[in-house]
Image (spheres, rainbow, N blue to C red):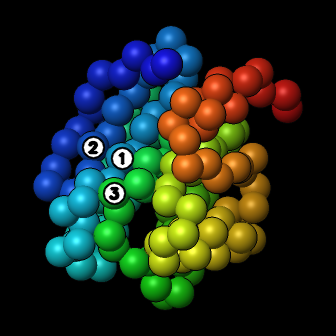
C-alpha cells in the first residue's frame, strides 16, 4: 500500500505523493462532472509542476470517480503540452478506472498517441493490483 502525503487538493483533483516509492497519484474526484476544459488544463499544469518538483518515477492515475470526458482536442493538447514535460521522469503509469466507462475510452485514446506510448502503462479496476504492478522494479 502507498504511504502518501497530499501535495495539492482542489474541487476536482487530489495530488498525492509517496516519496519512499517515488509514486505520484493524480486522483480525479466525482465533482469533475462540472469541470470544463480550461479547468482540466489548469489541473494538468499543476500536476506537471508537482512532478517537476518531486521527480516521481511512477504515476497512479486514479480515475474511478472521474466524470470529465477528454475530447480528441484535449487528447492532442495532452500529447503536445503535458506529456513531454514529464516523460523523462515517469517510467511507469497505472490507470485505475471503471472497466466500462466512457472516460476509459478517452483516456486510452490519449495514451495511444505518439508521446503517450512512451510510458510503460497498464489499466486496472482494482487499486491493490494497480499499486502492486506499479511498485515492481523499473527496468530501463
What label sits on residue 14 in the rendered view?
2
Q: Where does the image place residue 74, in percent across and percent down from the top left?
A: 46, 80
Q: Could you tell me if the residues under marks 3 and 1 are in contact, i.e. CB atoms within 8 Å?
A: yes
Can you give x and y, in whole percent of width and height, for residue 12 in the image? Answer: 22, 57
Q: Quadrant of residue 22?
A: top right
**In the figure, is residue 134 to the left or right of 27?**
right
Most foreground residue, 9 or 31? 31
Which residue lies most toward the left here? Answer: 11
Q: What is the distance, in whole Å, between disc 1 and disc 2 at their CAs?
A: 5 Å
Q: Is residue 6 left or right of residue 62?
A: left
Above or below residue 32? Residue 59 is above
Residue beneath disc 1: 27
When the figure is inspected, residue 33 is found, relative to residue 83, above or below; the finding is below
Asked whether 34 or 22 is in front, the reply is: 34
- Residue at the outermost top position: 20
Calculate the distance from the C-alpha at mark 3 to the C-alpha at mark 1.
8 Å
The residue pinned by badge 3 equals 65
Mark 3 residue element: loop
| Proximity of marks 1 and 2: CB atoms separated by less than 8 Å | yes
> Visible in this render: residue 87?
no
Amino acid at each position: 500500500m502507498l504511504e502518501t502525503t497530499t501535495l495539492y487538493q482542489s474541487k476536482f483533483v487530489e495530488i498525492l505523493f509517496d516519496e519512499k516509492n517515488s509514486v505520484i497519484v493524480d486522483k480525479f474526484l466525482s465533482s469533475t462532472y462540472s469541470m470544463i476544459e480550461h479547468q482540466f488544463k489548469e489541473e494538468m499544469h499543476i500536476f506537471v509542476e508537482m512532478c517537476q518538483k518531486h521527480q516521481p518515477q511512477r504515476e497512479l492515475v486514479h480515475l474511478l470517480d472521474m466524470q470529465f470526458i477528454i475530447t480528441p482536442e484535449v487528447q492532442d493538447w495532452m500529447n503536445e503540452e503535458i506529456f513531454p514535460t514529464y516523460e523523462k521522469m515517469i517510467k511507469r503509469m497505472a490507470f485505475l478506472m471503471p472497466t466500462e466507462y466512457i472516460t476509459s475510452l478517452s483516456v486510452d485514446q490519449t495514451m495511444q498517441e505518439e508521446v503517450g506510448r512512451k510510458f510503460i502503462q497498464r489499466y486496472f479496476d482494482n487499486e491493490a493490483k494497480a499499486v502492486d504492478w506499479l511498485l515492481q522494479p523499473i527496468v530501463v
